[in-house]
Image (cartoon, rainbow, N blue to C red):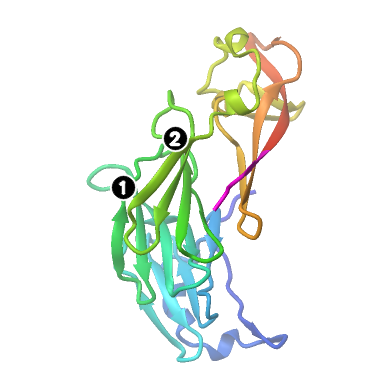
Amino acid sequence: MGATAWKIEVFQEGKNITHSLSAISEAAKDGGFLLPPNFQPWSPTGDLLSIPTWKAHHFLYDISQNSIVRSEIEGLIDALIWSPSENKYLVVAFCWAPVRSRSYFLADNSGLPKCQIDVMSLLDEPAQCWWLKDGSVFIILYRNSKQAHPFVEFFDSASGRSIERIPVNPSQLIPWHESEFRDISRDHYTLEISPSTRCVGSLLDTWHSCYFDNTTNRFSLAVYRPKDGKIVQKNEVVVPVKELRCQLQLEF
């Protein structure tokens, strides 16, 4: 499925009130609404709604005041997640000028950047971010190169300073016969999920599905592993794979 824009509707007590919220149309003029893969759009008080757009901006809409402001943070939004306890949010944005890059920011409830987070993650892998339930810490899972293993890094939400970084290597947590599959291309669609579906070979080396439950402080992480051996299809070596999952418990 592909989508170039999304429609926003706002309901109050089951009634669609979108047409009475004139300020939303200001964001609608900015190329249509974007739905990022990692998105929690509401402030903890429920009065502010974040609206990313396809023209590499995002807006903050104040429901009670029917007013809207555009954030000073430029870039196509890859992730935007509000703190569960304070009126601030973590936002990850792609930029293409002067070079292609991804930036992580903490921003306040007026869309102004409070600080930039020191993270250099792979541009071709989605941003994975979460908050602890009390809002004191936010978490980023990432790789900084295709040769590196993933890390989970913890940041202080007041300063944006890194607190701790721990490896979450799929090959250690879900061991496999890695040496037998080193010849499998990581840059092509060499993993067969089903007869009609393939995915890129690099998903043997990193987590393809990540979920964090901040009520239990538990990660659920999934990776692809070979079912059996390699097969050849149309002169290409392919590996039929299955999903394996593990859980990690954080102690805070």
Task: Name the disc covering residue 63, or none.
Answer: none
- Identity of the residue drawn at 33% across and 53% down: 161
Q: CA distance from mark 1 to mark 2?
A: 13 Å
- Identity of the residue drawn at 35% across and 67% down: 107
- Identity of the residue drawn at 40% across and 29% down: 145
| Residue 204 in view | no
206, above or below 69, in the image: above
Identify which amino acid the numbered label 2 is placed on: Arg
Of residue 81 and residue 53, the one placed in the foreground of this image is 81
| Residue 165 in view | yes
Hey, which quadrant is residue 197 in on the image? top right
Q: Position of residue 225 (x, y in %)?
A: 68, 23
Hey, which quadrant is residue 100 in on the image? top left
Q: Which residue of the protein is positioned furthest toward the front in this rendering?
A: 252
Residue occupied by mark 2: 143
- Identity of the residue drawn at 42% across and 61% down: 90
Of residue 95 and residue 241, the one placed in the foreground of this image is 241
Of residue 217 and residue 98, the one placed in the foreground of this image is 217
Residue occupied by mark 1: 118
- Relative side of 170 to 115, left or right: right
Q: Position of residue 61 (x, y in %)?
A: 45, 79
Q: Position of residue 119 (x, y in %)?
A: 35, 44
Please give the range of residues in magenta: 247-252
Question: Upstream in the sequence, badge 1 or badge 2?
Answer: 1
Identify which amino acid the numbered label 1 is placed on: Asp
Residue 164 highlighted magenta (yes or no): no
150, above or below 178, in the image: below
Q: Position of residue 11 (x, y in %)?
A: 65, 83
